Image (cartoon, grey):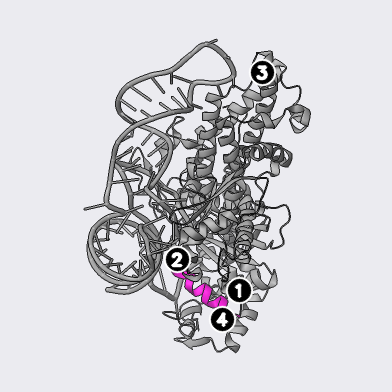
Amino acid sequence: MLIKNQLAALVKDAIIAAQNSGALPAFAIPDVYIERPQRKELGDYSCSLPLKLARAAKRAPLEIAQAIAAHFPRAEAIAQVEGAPPGFVNITLNDAWIARQVETILAQGARYGDVEPARRDALRIQVEYVSANPTGPLHIGGGRNGALGDTLANVLNAAGHNVQREFYINDNGTQVRLFGESIFARYAQALGRDESFPEKGYQGAYVIEMGKQIAREHNEKFLRIPRAQAVRELGRLGIAIVLDNYAKTLARMGVRFDNWFSERSLHESGLFAQVFQILQDKGLTAEKDGATWFAAQELGEDKDAVLIRSPQVIAEPDERPTYLASDVAYVWNKLVVRNFDRAIYIWGADHHGDVPRVLAATRALGLDPARAIIILHQFVNLKRGGELIKMSKRAGEFVTMDELLDEVGADAVRFMLIAQHANTTMDFDLELAKKQSDENPVFYVQYAHARISSILKKAIESGALSDPSTLLRASGGDVALLTHPAELDLIREILRLPEIVELVAAKLEPHHLPHYAISLAGIFHAFYKQCRVVSSDPADAAITRARLKLVAAAQNALARTLNLIGVRAPETM
RNA sequence: GCGCCCGUAGCUCAAUGGAUAGAGCAUCAGUCUUCGGAACUGAGUGUUGGGGGUUCGAAUCCCUCCGGGCGCACCA
């Protein structure tokens, strides 16, 4: 169990003990929250509960804090508990206990950072991300989405949940046909035919390339079949090509999926018809102007929304269901058919207007809307040395994710996309991201990791360490020798990792991870400066072995953090 | 016009309603006989966009104004 959760239980015990002894009056004890004080002189943890209890207990906050401190149960991990004005309980951990944790951290190996190996409240969680329209190259918004989703999935997994990663393929309706027509035109043109380009077609140069490629691979095959069929097949072929490229691009930045889910399948399987029936039975559908609407106003929303468009507007039956129709069926598929406890959606901010409708539909289907969690992320402005790079999708002029990865490198891109709160508009400066210097935090963190690798290698070369596996044995060193303030600071920081994992999993905010990584790297570098690890002096043999354990534990935490962020933890730079 | 998001140090950003609002970069001043100087130590910088309110306590919650972004289709 996390240290802070154990402390919360002890605070509760202390209050009960104080009440039993008459030091505090009887009152109901609320949930106990343990915090980290801002200044480290105040201790490792603190609790502000006395400030909240003052009214119920009819005592001064400081008096309550002191009573809690006086009745605090003894625990080997704790060195000191004291009440401090205006009403905090400050808790300081025992240095010897902290030093011993190095063994625990090493023993957990690559799993260090996991909140609990098997938690009782583990959930089946689906995280769905990127889900960009597969009609053109991935751009940086999709990259931010993917980085957020993948890291979140990593962390939820580390927090003990069962996670599935999904990409939702928008392969239904009008856009497939339009994409198919665009490809058909480029394909025919590539074969020297005089084929006009559709009015609202996809303009980008990549469609021309696609047309040429298909012309090379299939010759005149699509000219010999009926045009409508050719358009449909080319649309699907085009989507397959784009998705294949998405997978490659995303894999470059470590973003992966367990499942690629087809929107079209929601209609072909009859699921939408089934879910529509539920809405109809509840009287939540309406016919108006030839279209079929979701009566969202009945549920308190601003306006109704079209589910199935009028035949007068769209002739083809399979193009009539709207995006919302698919969404309604999809949430049912997630929460009922596949029975996920939670369905997390990661959407770009341009979709924020759809959030209330999807949640309203979830409620309308009789599902707990708290099970569907939509995380929005704001846009990314690409800059080059402070100059905004203008991006025009219509003209097909934009920096693609692949170009960005080519220029900046996957690690820097992924780290920077995660480092900022999802809800803030991000300025991504290409020049800054490319700098391999102090200005770039990714290298700072990776450097710390590489430095540790170098120390371990040096230790083996010098004979101080025979084999890294000996670090796991008591003979590998006595961690009780770790008493230097810089050593203890480093261990304290390593011990924060599981708390960070819990925080990110609870608030669904991955940006805490990069900030922690920078902090951990900084504290390691400070330790490195103050404490020589591999010493040539035989008298230092014992402390060298103890410090090798500490350094290995630090590397363990750093590697895991980078791993969760989705960035490499290099042995050398 | 209506709705959502954002506004914190010169810059980029942190801060479960808690204590003196913190990091990095940049700036200035220091630190190398041995493990990677892509490092470390120290210093200064704030009306948390403005103004009200709630609270024992507000960057955080509520109202209002200002500035920026994004939405407001029988598009996805």
Q: Chain of mark 2?
A: A
Whether A358 is among the magenta residues is: yes
Q: Which residue is mark 1?
A: A329
**Alpha carbon of mark 2 to alpha carbon of mark 3: how far?**
61 Å
Looking at marks 4 and 1 on the same chain, the residue that comes earlier in the sequence is marked by 1
Q: Would you say A477 lies left or right of B31 here?
A: right
Q: Chain of mark 1?
A: A
The Cα atoms of the two marked residues, 2 and 4, are separated by: 19 Å
The three-letter amino acid code for the residue at tag 2 is: His
The local secondary structure at tag 2 comes to helix
Is A430 inside the magenta-drawn segment? no
SS state under label 1:
helix
- Of residues A529 and A269, the one nearer the viewer is A529
Numbered disc 4: what chain? A
Above or below, A487 against A144 in this view is: above
Q: Amino acid at mark 1?
A: Ala
Mark nearer the N terminus (2 vs 4) = 2
- Label 3 lies in what chain? A
Mark 4 = which residue? A364
Task: Find disc 2 in the rendering and name its residue.
Answer: A352
Q: Secondary structure at mark 3?
A: helix
Residue drawn at x 55%, y 32% as measured from the top left: A485
Secondary element under disc 4, as helix, strand or loop, is helix
Mark 4 or 1, closer to the camera: 4
Name the quarter where the C terminus of chain A is drawn: top right
- The alpha-carbon separation of the residues under discs 2 and 1 comes to 19 Å
Q: Does label 4 or label 3 sit earlier along the sequence? A: 4
How far across and down, in percent of the image, does residue A239 sit?
A: 58, 57
Q: Range of the magenta residues?
A: A351-366
Q: Nearer the viewer, mark 2 or mark 1?
A: 2
Expressed as whole percent of the image width and height from the top left, the position of residue A70 reads 58, 54
Q: Which residue is mark 3?
A: A540
